[in-house]
């Protein structure tokens, strides 16, 4: 067998191993354990509070999202839907609320708070090893992949709908 063929077979084997690893990672994240059981279509109000940023509050009116704080304007529906999707983040691990020191994991005080109707999710620091975010989700503290924290700390202007005159 030529050297080139051996190299190609070896690289194909590495690609196959990576594909298998990706498959199992996605399969693990698609487990039914989600951060909350909230149906995003049923949520009527949403509030985002975070350290060092302006509090944002939204309400669903006639099927569209309206920003109430800091400015009473129409909100970008897609941006608010991305915030709602945080409630369905896959959970990697759950700990009972008293099992971890809230101060050490950034939950006392929380770095951000997402309130969906009556459900409150408090976000703490990230895990140093896996980069997962600690979330106080009621009776448990969950570790979820941190793919959303930028959404929590965005400025309010990014969630405002573009006025028709500015779109032209």
Image (tube, rainbow, N blue to C red):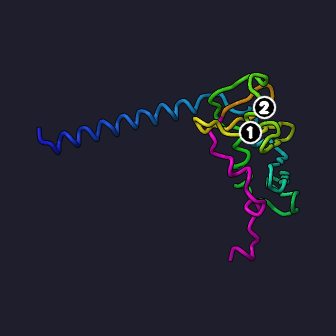
Looking at the picture, tell me which residue is in the foreground, 67 or 155. 155
Looking at the picture, tell me which residue is in the foreground, 68 or 147. 147
Which of the 4 image quadrants contains residue 120?
A: top right
Instruction: Tell me which residue sits at (39%, 37%) in the image.
Output: 18
Q: Is residue 147 magenta?
A: yes
Quadrant for the N terminus in the image: top left
Please indicate whether residue 68 sits to the left or right of residue 98 in the image: right
User: For numbered disc 1, what is the local secondary structure?
Assistant: strand
- What span is colored magenta in the figure? 144-168
Quadrant for the C terminus in the image: bottom right
Q: Which mark is residue 102?
A: 2
User: For numbered disc 2, what is the local secondary structure?
Assistant: loop
Q: State how far apart marks 1 and 2 are (Cα).
A: 8 Å
Instruction: Tell me which residue sits at (52%, 35%) in the image.
Output: 26
Which of the 4 image quadrants contains residue 142?
A: top right
Q: Residue furthest left?
A: 1
Q: Is residue 150 magenta?
A: yes
Please indicate whether residue 15 sits to the left or right of residue 115 in the image: left
Residue that label 1 marks: 124
In the rendering, at what x and y percent does residue 73 appear? Answer: 84, 63
Which of disc 2 and disc 1 is earlier in sequence? 2
Looking at the picture, tell me which residue is in the foreground, 94 or 52. 52
In the rendering, at what x and y percent does residue 111 appear? Answer: 77, 44
- Residue 69 to residue 6: above or below: below
Q: Are marks 1 and 2 in contact (CB under 8 Å)?
A: yes
Instruction: Tell me which residue sits at (81%, 36%) in the image.
Output: 108
Q: Residues within 10 Å of mark 1 (few under 14, many from 20)?
A: many
- Residue 13 to residue 162: above or below: above
- Residue 57 to residue 25: above or below: below
Instruction: Tell me which residue sits at (71%, 33%) in the image.
Output: 35
Which of the 4 image quadrants contains residue 64?
A: bottom right
In the rendering, at what x and y percent does residue 125 appear? Answer: 71, 40
């Amino acid at each position: 067998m030529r050297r080139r063929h051996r190299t190609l077979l070896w690289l194909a084997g590495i690609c196959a191993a990576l594909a298998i690893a990706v498959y199992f990672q996605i399969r693990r994240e698609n487990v039914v354990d989600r951060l909350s059981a909230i149906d995003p279509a049923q949520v009527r109000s949403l509030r985002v509070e975070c350290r060092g940023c302006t509090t944002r509050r939204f309400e669903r009116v006639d099927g569209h999202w309206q920003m109430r704080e800091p400015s009473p304007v129409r909100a970008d529906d897609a941006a608010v839907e991305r915030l709602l999707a945080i409630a369905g983040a896959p959970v990697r691990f759950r700990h009972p609320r008293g099992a971890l020191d809230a101060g050490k994991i950034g939950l006392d005080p929380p770095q951000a708070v997402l309130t969906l109707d009556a459900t409150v999710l408090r976000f703490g620091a990230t895990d140093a090893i896996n980069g997962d975010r600690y979330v106080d989700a009621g009776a448990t503290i969950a570790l979820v992949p941190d793919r959303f924290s930028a959404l929590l700390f965005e400025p309010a202007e990014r969630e405002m709908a573009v006025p028709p005159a500015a779109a032209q």
